[in-house]
Each structure stands twice: as C-alpha cells, then as structure tokens.
Image: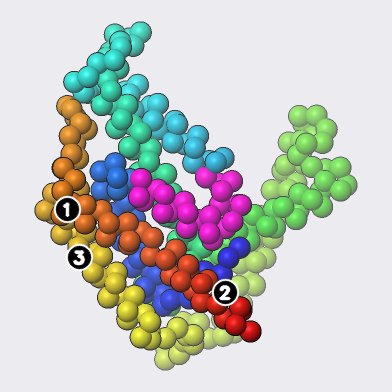
C-alpha cells in the first residue's frame, strides 16, 4: 500500500472532494465524463489498495458492468437504430445498448469512488466533521463503519479455529454443515454483544454525553488545506458552469448526439479531469519530492 498524501489533508477537504466527484459522477452522463470518472477512481483505488484494488475491479466491477450493460437493452427498447428483433418481438436498438454501457460505467465509477472514500475518510474524520452537528448519527455511522471490518476479521479467526477442529462449513454432510454454521453464528453473536458492552463501558468511563465535555482533535486547517480548498472550489465552479451551460450535454435517445468538442467544452472536460485526478497529482508530486530527497542523501 502506498502512502497517500491526499489522506493527510484536512477532513473537510477530503469530504468535499468525494462529495464533488460522486455528484458529478452520477449526474454527468457524457461518455467522456464517464470514462474520466471511472478511470480516475480505478487508478486512485489501485494506488490506495494495490493489488487488492485491482482484484476488486476485475472480480466484482467487470461482472456488474456486464450485467448492467446486458439488462438495459433487454428491457429498454427505445432508440431509432434497430439492430435486430428479440424473440419477444421487441426491437434491439443500438441506442439502448450504448446507454446500458454508459449506465454500467456510471455505476462502476460511483462504486470505485465509494471504495476510495472508505479508505480516506476514516471514522475519526467523520466524527470530527459531524460530531457537533449530528452527534448521535455520526457516532452510529462511525461505529457501524468500524464494526464491519472488525466483524469480518473476527469471522475469519473463528472459522480458522473451527476448521482446525473439523467444524468448518465445508466439513461433513448437509446437516453437519448447518450445525457448524449455527455454531459459528452463535459465537459471532456472542462476540458482538460482548464487544457492544465493552464499548458502552469504555464510552461511559470517558464521560461521553456529559455536558461541557471537550474533544481532542489532531486536525488543523493550514495553508496547504486552504490552497486545496481554492483549487477544489475553482474546479467545482467551472464544472458546474459547464454543466449548466450545456458543455456536458449528451443524449442517447432517440439518436445519440452530443455537444461538439470546441475549445470551451474541451476546457470543461480538462478541468473535470484535473478534479478527478487531484489525489493522484498530489501523490505523484509528493513521491517525486521524496525520491529527490532520498537521492540527495
């Protein structure tokens, strides 16, 4: 796993960035925007997770994209270019196929951005941002996000222990496997309840919920974060301006047609590309500085 420079920025910068790319990724249906969003999110996810991020893209996103691309022309028959007729008598159109691919790209890009969000926006960052505004909800969300990976890790530990004594889900007949599964489930439920009690006792001992209780934070909004906010603000403003002005217009029905790539619409795409690649640009610049310092030693 590489050291992510963007994760070291203020939580507000991280949150606003992901809010921007997620909103734009879901709303901008221009083919170029979809490719930019998916490509940038995939590259950043691989940078954060390494081979694990690549396996996630190949094992889960590709089948999901293929399924989405196939389902749309099977149920959506709009479009002027008829390629063939299905056994049901409904037409198979080129526009419905292309729109299915576009929807698959959009869905995959959003999933990839959420995967990056989970790596960068940790639970302590979320509580820092929303702890004072919505303390109960932020605490519940933080505990939920933290509980899922811990539950998976504990499940692997329990399964390995049960496998060593021949009581795994793959041992024995159907009834024996069901019995082993119920045993593992019982162990996990007991562990979850004990963990909840320990967490409640720990929070009570630290004075959670008492009036006037202060909170420690390691985050400081410095000049680097201000520069990042100005950059994100410019990219957001310019992209929204292009969105409202029709610079990202593209229709799929009844025929495919988009705005011509004149200098102004092209500038919108370049700014949107720069916005999506911001974490990778920052990481690349920091990596070059680090290599230069190491070579100078």
| Residue in the image at 45% along x and 90% along y | 214
The quarter of the picture where residue 89 lies is top left
Query: In the image, is residue 295 part of the stretch drawn in magenta?
Result: no
Q: Is residue 212 visible?
A: yes
Q: Specify the quadrant of the image occupied by residue 260.
A: top left
Dominant secondary-structure state across the stretch colored magenta: helix
Secondary structure state at the residue bearing disc 3:
helix
- Front disc: 3 or 1: 1
Residue 123 visible? The answer is: no
Percent position of residue 256, x then y: 20, 31
Which quarter shows the C terminus? Answer: bottom right
Nearer mark to the viewer, of 2 and 3: 2
Image point 63% across, 70% down: which residue? Answer: 197
- Secondary structure beneath dot 1 equals helix
What span is in magenta?
35-57
Q: Which residue corresponds to mark 3?
A: 237
- Residue 112 drawn at (x, y percent): 45, 51
Upstream in sequence: badge 3 or badge 1: 3
Secondary structure of the residue carrying tag 2 is helix
Residue under pointer 1: 263
- Name the spot of residue 103 as percent of width and height, x first: 33, 38
Q: CA distance from mark 2 to mark 3?
A: 34 Å
Q: Which mark is drawn over residue 291?
A: 2
In front: 241, or 125?
241
| Quadrant position of residue 240 | bottom left
């Amino acid at each position: 796993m590489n050291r992510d420079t963007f994760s070291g920025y203020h939580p507000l910068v991280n949150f606003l960035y992901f809010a921007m790319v997620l909103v734009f990724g879901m709303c901008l249906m221009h083919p170029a925007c979809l490719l930019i969003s998916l490509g940038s999110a995939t590259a950043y996810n691989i940078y954060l997770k390494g081979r694990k991020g690549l396996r996630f893209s190949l094992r889960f996103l590709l089948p999901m994209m293929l399924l989405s691309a196939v389902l749309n022309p099977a149920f959506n028959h709009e479009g002027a270019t008829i390629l063939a007729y299905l056994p049901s008598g409904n037409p198979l159109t080129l526009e419905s196929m292309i729109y299915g691919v576009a929807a698959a790209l959009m869905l995959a890009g959003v999933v990839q951005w959420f995967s990056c969000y989970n790596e960068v926006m940790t639970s302590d960052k979320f509580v820092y941002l929303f702890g004072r505004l919505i303390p109960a909800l932020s605490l519940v969300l933080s505990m939920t996000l933290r509980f899922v990976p811990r539950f998976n890790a504990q499940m692997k530990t329990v399964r390995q222990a049960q496998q060593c004594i021949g009581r795994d889900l793959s041992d024995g007949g159907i009834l024996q496997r069901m019995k082993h599964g119920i045993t593992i489930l019982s162990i996990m439920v007991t562990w979850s309840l004990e963990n909840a009690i320990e967490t409640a006792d720990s929070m009570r001992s630290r004075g959670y919920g008492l009036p006037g209780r202060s909170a420690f934070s390691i985050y400081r909004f410095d000049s680097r974060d201000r520069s990042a906010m100005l950059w994100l603000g410019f990219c957001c403003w310019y992209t929204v301006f292009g969105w409202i002005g029709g610079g990202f217009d593209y229709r799929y029905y009844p025929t495919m047609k988009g705005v011509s790539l004149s200098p102004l619409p092209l500038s919108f795409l370049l700014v949107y590309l720069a916005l999506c690649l911001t974490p990778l640009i920052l990481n690349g610049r920091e990596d070059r500085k680090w290599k230069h310092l190491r070579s100078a030693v």
